[in-house]
Amino acid sequence: MPTEKPVKKTKKVAAKAGDEKGDKVHKLTLKGSAKMVSEFFEYSIHSILFQRGVYPADDFSPVKKYGLNMLMNTDDQVQAYIKKIMSQLSKWMLHGKISKFILVISDKDTGNKLERWQFDVHILGKGKKKATKDAEVEMGDKENAAGASSDATVDKTDKEIQEEIQSIFRQITASVTFLPMLDGNFNCTFNVLVYADGDAEVPMEWGDGEDEGIQDAEQVQLRSWSSSSHRVETMNYTHYSDANGRIVPDKHRDTPGLSASKARQIRGLVLPENSAANKSIVVVAEMAETICFECSSESGA
């Protein structure tokens, strides 16, 4: 009588929704999310500088990021300057010190502020408590530590996060169709401003400066994106334009809600006047009084 072979039992595993490449739920650590936000700011700077014509198109080359063809400035001094900004910004982001990141385009000859791109940063859920707790320690194994919070967060797939970021860069690209022209009448330059907590550590080479807004500005609300730890909201402020679509920067006072008269602001890394990357970086730390300092131009060489 033939002996039956034992049947090997196999465990069937149901395919989980979202297992396809790009659809996997990505629970970012606070450190990973902070890095993602910093990278987003860096690519935003390059994209805005290109789309708004702050530098000639020949100064940019294409790169692939977020599933899009992005453009990055290739000038050595500009690249080095932006990298230096991002190096410090990444440290502040990691410790949850940033509430606003702002790019201001201005007329170098007159000092008039022409356009303002503002990114509001919100720390969500467990990351909010963790950023406070880890502000005085190095980020390491603690980045997965639990922390109680009443803020609700939603886990998203890699694809969902990327699509949200893509939509913002598409809006920045389309900005040339709905924002006033920055034509040859302006010798454009830019400042990077960061609103940080009053207890944020500031490098020795940094001093204080001032943040001036744009009064009576037209406001354009762009899309937002979020991870499990951060939400970034985007807003553009620009002067009213004339009948030909050109900026009219005659009204120049502080933008309501953006006045810095009661904020401590730090300016630094100013490059020499003959530098192609002659820009300034300002960090605004929320404090009770205004203290104004500025680095000498030699400090940013």
Image (cartoon, grey):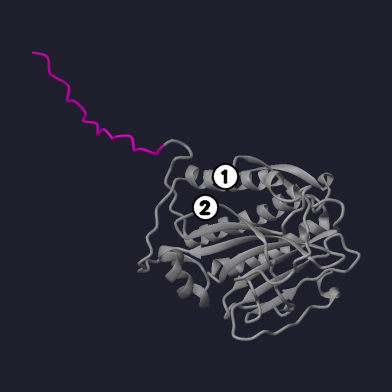
Q: Residue at x 67, y 77 (%)?
A: 265
| Residue annotated with mark 2 | 225
Q: Is residue 133 magenta?
A: no
Is residue 37 positioned above or below 175 on the image?
below
Going by the numbered disc 2, the residue's amino acid type is Trp
Disc 1 and disc 2 in contact, CB within 8 angstroms: yes
Q: Which residue of the protein is positioned furthest toward the left in this rendering?
A: 1
Q: Along the polypeptide, which appears first: circle 1 or circle 2? A: 1
- With 109 as the anchor, is 231 left or right in this view? left
Is residue 58 positioned above or below 241 on the image?
above
Q: Is residue 17 magenta?
A: yes
Q: Which residue of the protein is positioned furthest toward the front in this rendering?
A: 243
Q: Residue at x 34, y 38 (%)?
A: 16
Q: Main secondary structure of the magenta part?
A: loop
Q: For residue 249, what is the image quadrant?
A: bottom right
The answer for how far apart the CA atoms under marks 1 and 2 are is 9 Å
Highlighted magenta segment, given as a residue range: 1-19
